Each structure stands twice: as structure tokens, then as C-alpha cells.
Image (tube, rainbow, N blue to C red):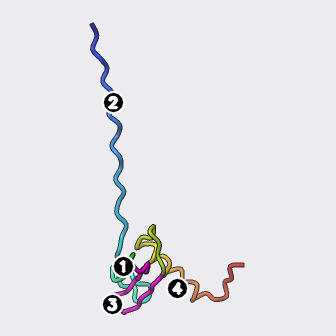
Amino acid sequence: MGKRKSRAKPPPKKRMDKLDTVFSCPFCNHGTSVECRIDMKNLIGEASCRICQESFSTNVTALTEPIDIYCEWIDECERVNNPDDDDA
């Protein structure tokens, strides 16, 4: 009589690394000085620098992460610094 074949275990799921919540400031270039906070009650996200006191706030959704707020701040800075570049 033969032995029953055992089922192979499925490979373990890879864990997603957590995204950063602290970034470098686009104004004072100080590393890890910008902290992003999300207020889901009021649907507002805020990124603020602890060194130069610059801040940026935007509307958020349930899927918004702190990196999204920081990226919007960087995009807005670039848009303000390059007014001659039109989207059309």
C-alpha cells in the first residue's frame, strides 16, 4: 500500500512595507522635518515643516496616504515656480 501525497503549502504572502510619514522640506531642505497628518473627520490632510514652519493642506479621501499629501505639496510648489508651463 502506498502513502498518500501531502499537499504543498502555498508560499507565504509578502508583507508590504509601510510608507513614510516624515519627509524632507522643499523650502529649507532639512531632512525628516516635514510631518504629514490626516484628519479623516474633517477630510483634511496637512504637511508641515517643524524647522521653517511652512505648511500645506489639502482635501483627502479614504484612500489618501501621507506620501500623497507630500507629493501634492511638491507638485503645487513646482506649479507656482513655473507659471509659464501650461497644461494645454
The three-letter code of the residue at mark 2 reads Ala
Q: Which residue is mark 4?
A: 77
Q: CA distance from mark 3 to mark 1?
A: 16 Å
Upstream in sequence: badge 3 or badge 2:
2
Return the x and y of residue 87 as percentages of the image width and height: 68, 79
In the picture provided, is 55 more to the left or to the right than 79? left
Q: CA distance from mark 2 to mark 1?
A: 44 Å
Return the x and y of residue 14 as percentages of the image width and height: 35, 49
Secondary element at tag 2: loop
Upstream in sequence: badge 1 or badge 4:
1
Circle 3 packing at 10 Å, graded few (<14), some (14-19), many (20+), is: some
Q: CA distance from mark 2 to mark 4?
A: 53 Å
**What number is the disc on residue 51?**
3
Q: Residue at x 35, y 60 (%)?
A: 17
Total labels: the figure holds 4
| Badge nearest the viewer, 2 or 4 | 2
- As drawn, the residue found furthest toward the right would be 88
Which segment is the magenta one? 42-58
Secondary element at tag 1: strand
Secondary element at tag 3: loop
Upstream in sequence: badge 2 or badge 4:
2
Upstream in sequence: badge 4 or badge 3:
3
Q: Do the CB atoms of the residues marked 3 and 2 lie less than 8 Å apart? A: no
The three-letter code of the residue at mark 4 reads Cys
Q: CA distance from mark 4 to mark 3?
A: 18 Å
**What number is the disc on residue 37?**
1
Q: Residue at x 55, y 83 (%)?
A: 78
